[in-house]
Image (cartoon, grey):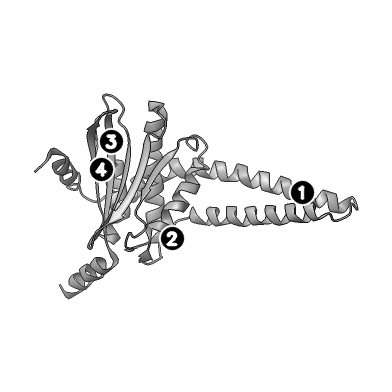
Amino acid sequence: MTETRQAFLEAQTEGPTPARVWGDQWLRVSEKVLKGLNHQLTNRIASLEAVVGIFQDGEPFEPEVIAALAQEVSRLNHLLVLFRCMPAEPFAGAEPVRLQDIVPQVLELHGHHADLRGVAVEVDADFDTLPVLVRPSALLRCLLVVLESGAGNALRAGGSNALKLSYASDATSVSVIFEAPQPEGQAIFTGEGSLVHAVRSALAHAFAEVGVTVVNTVHGERIRYELRLPTLPEARRREREATAL
């Protein structure tokens, strides 16, 4: 067994993470993202107020003004979609979800993070990736938390395109990998309260495996988080097996 594979397996041995621990992980990220979203909301409202002011002044309705109003309404509607991604849905059931639909939302939310939005994310997506069975809000929140952890490392490293996200699938599993620079001297922590443990707990309903390893590259050591979830048919099979026990 390779060291990388062994490290991945060792990261799965802890017990369940208390909800408080996951809450702490999410709170740190969500506060920064909401700060950025609120800033954009203020901008959109200011733009609408400017257009309304033109109407109130009795100015003629120029086509450019009408087009600007329509554009601001469209931007506001899209911003509301992102706001709706943020709340948890604790009573929602698992449903078929495609990474191809979730990842763009995660990247957009990252683009509003107050401190880390400037960190570029290099995405390697297999658009034939099979769907998984998961609570959509849980998957989105977990992906965003891991992404921002990697973005923090990339920001400290100061390199361009230092943060990478990739996903693909085979017949039975879907793999999502985040890779970022590893701060020198920083040990990997996978115990209770760690990022690995918190994400694994949040996705336990989806039969998820979560691991972290450090890999050596020509650019130095990099930390790699990997999430593995069964494909939709495989998840259904596991559910049937669990019910039969």
Mark number displayed over residue 10: none
Read off the residue under disc 2.
Answer: 89
Please name which of the two marks, 2 or 1, marks the residue nearer to the observer: 1
Q: CA distance from mark 1 to mark 3?
A: 46 Å
Q: Secondary structure at mark 1?
A: helix
Please name which of the two marks, 4 or 1, marks the residue nearer to the observer: 1
Residue at x 24% of width, y 59% of height: 170
Please name which of the two marks, 4 or 3, marks the residue nearer to the observer: 3
Quadrant of the drawing holding the N terminus:
top left
Read off the residue under disc 1.
Answer: 49
Read off the residue under disc 3.
Answer: 223
Whichever of callouts 2 and 3 sits on the residue coming sooner in the sequence is 2
Whichever of callouts 4 and 1 sits on the residue coming sooner in the sequence is 1
Q: Secondary structure at mark 2?
A: loop
The answer to whether 196 is drawn above or below residue 102 in the figure is above
Read off the residue under disc 4.
Answer: 192
Q: Position of residue 144 (x, y in %)?
A: 41, 47
Q: Do residues under tags 2 and 3 come within 8 Å of each other at their CB atoms?
A: no
Q: Amino acid at mark 1?
A: Glu
Q: Position of residue 83 (x, y in %)?
A: 54, 53
The answer to whether 57 is drawn above or below residue 212 in the figure is below
